[in-house]
Amino acid sequence: MSVVRVGFAMCGSFCTFSQVIPQIAALVKEGADVYPIMSQMAATTDTRFGKAEDFVQQIEKICGKKIISTIAEAEPIGPKKLLDILIIEPCTGNTLGKLANGITDSSVTMAAKSQLRNNRPVLIAVSTNDGLTAGAKNIGMLQNYKNIFFVPYRQDDCEKKPSSLVADFSKTSVAMHSALEKIQIQPMLL
Ligand SMILES: Cc1cc2nc3c(=O)[nH]c(=O)nc-3n(C[C@H](O)[C@H](O)[C@H](O)COP(=O)(O)O)c2cc1C
């Protein structure tokens, strides 16, 4: 079987990084060639969840590649047909809104635009506190778009954060293999 070329794009949902990074490692372990991508926010912001530089180093070591973090670096994904699939994980409410409305002003949205122009799949793993409020219409729009697939997701903490949604990151690989066949894994809503 040929090696799957995966773009793995991380947005600024910092609290999920410790769960998401092991998914990158798991894809590498299963033989995928992973191209790491980070939004500028994700690549440069120190938070209580860790230092940006530490995350960048960790991810580059896992993938054996430099992180793509600018629009200019992400642009060749389209013309060079670099990726079989682009995974956006974690995908913020901010990036969901841009993707749903055709806005391309970050490395991650540029990577998505480049990938979609080639009629190739984009897999989204949401993590946003406005998933059932302002972000809901964006998720709904994206679910209606060609070549967009979702890692199954659920309410995060319905008592304390009733509008928050988060993907089950442990389903990344299985959702990816399904999306590569252009099939949305089910159930999508957990
Ligand atoms: C500590 C911290 C945690 C955040 N967590 C989230 C989150 O889980 N989900 C989300 O949608 N935005 C979250 N944000 C806000 C995003 O980082 C912000 O909207 C940013 O503009 C996203 O940019 P990006 O989509 O290009 O990565 C968080 C911000 C900070 C500082």
Image (tube, grey):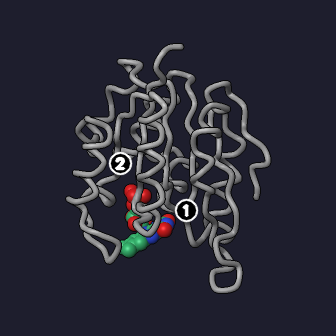
Q: Nearer the viewer, residue 176 or 161?
A: 176
Residue 32: mark: none
| Residue on which the image places disc 2 | 106
Query: How busy is the neighbourhood of tag 1: few (under 14 within 10 Å), some, or many (20 plus)?
Result: many
Quarter of the rendering containing residue 49: bottom left
Q: Quadrant of ligand 1?
A: bottom left
Cβ of mark 2 under 8 A from ligand 1: yes
Q: 179 above or below 37? A: above
The type of residue carrying mark 2 is: Ser
Q: Is residue 23 left or right of residue 60?
A: right
The x and y percentages for residue 68 are 28, 40
In the image, what residue occupies the spot 23% across and 60% down?
54
The x and y percentages for residue 160 are 64, 86
Cβ of mark 1 under 8 A from ligand 1: yes
Q: Is residue 127 left or right of residue 62?
A: right
In the image, what residue occupies the spot 44% across and 35% down?
29
In the image, what residue occupies the spot 32% across and 77% down?
48
Is tag 1's residue or tag 2's residue first in the polypeptide sequence?
A: 2
Quarter of the rendering containing residue 174: top right
Query: How busy is the neighbourhood of tag 2: few (under 14 within 10 Å), some, or many (20 plus)?
Result: many
| Residue on which the image places disc 1 | 127
Tag in front: 1 or 2: 1
